[in-house]
Amino acid sequence: MEHRPHKGTKKVELAADRGQHGQFPRVRMRRNRASDWSRRLVRETNLTVDDLIWPVFIKDGGAKREPIPSMPGVHRLTIPALLTAAEEAARLGIPAIALFPYVPKERKDERAEEAVRSDNLCNRAIRALKKAVPEIGVICDVALDPFTSHGHDGVMKGERIVNDETVDILCRMALAQAEAGVDVVAPSDMMDGRIGQVRDALDAEGHQSTLIMSYAAKYASAFYGPFRDAIGSKGALKGDKRTYQMDFGNGDEAIRECALDVAEGADMLMVKPGLPYLDVLHRVKQAFRMPTFAYQVSGEYSMIKAAAQNGWLDNDKAMIESLSCFKRAGADGILTYFAIEAAQKLRG
Ligand code: PBG
């Protein structure tokens, strides 16, 4: 079918040939690839330190740094350790860090009361960071799951996660973070209507400059496994998150989710997880031309680390390749647990 000659088709093909699509043997694609200098010269996208956002797990008390077994090389940090780590990140030129709290069982409840307290771990960390390392951007997740006894991102009524009541709490949570001085609030809960309501709540209290990075297209994913270890919600989570996070079979739905969040006032969009969803990332960037971010999530990180520890692949090469592919697909930046390692590598 494709080769059936149509009237006039030949002419079009020849015109295309005279343009960029020549033919062998005059055209040899390998010429540009022959040397390091020419490969660098023709490279279409480049990963830089400016593309990196470092997600950090924080905790109260105990050892300054506590390893997370399912995420080799990643630690939960106390606030003093966080400040040291943030200084290093800033020195390397990493633009921003994203905070995720480890919350002990006794601070969790059905309605995530801890999430809205002005002196909770995140808010104390934000204040300390903005004082000690003011040059680094501070992003904080807005979602209830670290704080709920059932591990869900919303309030439960029976078996249901109730939307509107949850959004009210998210607004109070975002406000408490803004008051602590956070630069960017990042709603990651996937409740409907939360971006608009968070924007209104912030604006009503004079926080017009606080940015919103929306986890706009966030999928119910098996790749979050190690993260739930890290924040201590794994044992707690009852069931799964499929009534609010997206179905991995859907792409058009991601465009609708993003369109809503753009209309509601999101400053930045995020697609999550990362590598298995590069098609979604590409479509979102093409559709909206918004600052668009990808999250290389815990499971993606741990897969590379585990394989590298077994000698099955080269850690640094897999790290730089995977991060670079996000750029090629259209990302303006990547949240990655490799941020420090990648920045060190990129700085040589
Ligand atoms: C909280 C949240 C999650 C992640 C970021 N924010 C987990 C979840 O939705 O269950 C996952 C990050 C990762 O796996 O690295 N809503």
Image: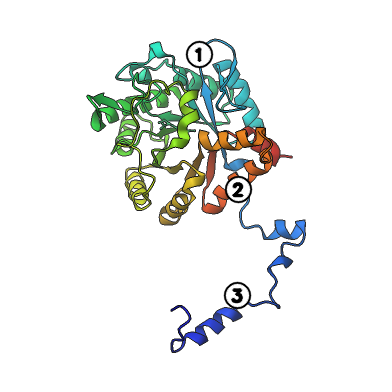
- Label 2 sits on a secondary structure element that is helix
The crowd level at tag 1 (other Cα within 10 Å; few <14, some 14-19, many 20+) is some
Q: CA distance from mark 2 to mark 3?
A: 26 Å
Residues at circles 1 and 2 in contact by the CB criterion of under 8 Å? no
The quarter of the picture where the C terminus appears is top right
From the image, tell me which residue sits under label 3.
Answer: 21
Q: Is residue 122 above or below residue 35?
A: above
In this rendered view, identify the residue nearer to me: 266 or 345.
345
Q: Which residue shows up at 56% across the image and 84% down it?
A: 14
Q: Which mark is residue 60?
A: 1
Colour logic:
rainbow
Q: Which label's residue is closer to the chain start, 2 or 3? A: 3
Q: Report whether 125 appears left or right of 87.
A: left
Residues at circles 2 and 3 in contact by the CB criterion of under 8 Å? no
Q: Looking at numbered disc 2 in the image, what kind of residue is underneath it?
A: Ser
Which label sits in the foreground, 3 or 1?
A: 3
Residue 297 pos. (x, y %): 50, 36
Q: How many marks?
A: 3
- Label 1 sits on a secondary structure element that is loop
From the image, tell me which residue sits under label 2.
Answer: 324
- Label 3 sits on a secondary structure element that is loop
Q: Looking at numbered disc 1 in the image, what kind of residue is underneath it?
A: Asp
In this view of the protein, can residue 183 be seen by the observer?
no
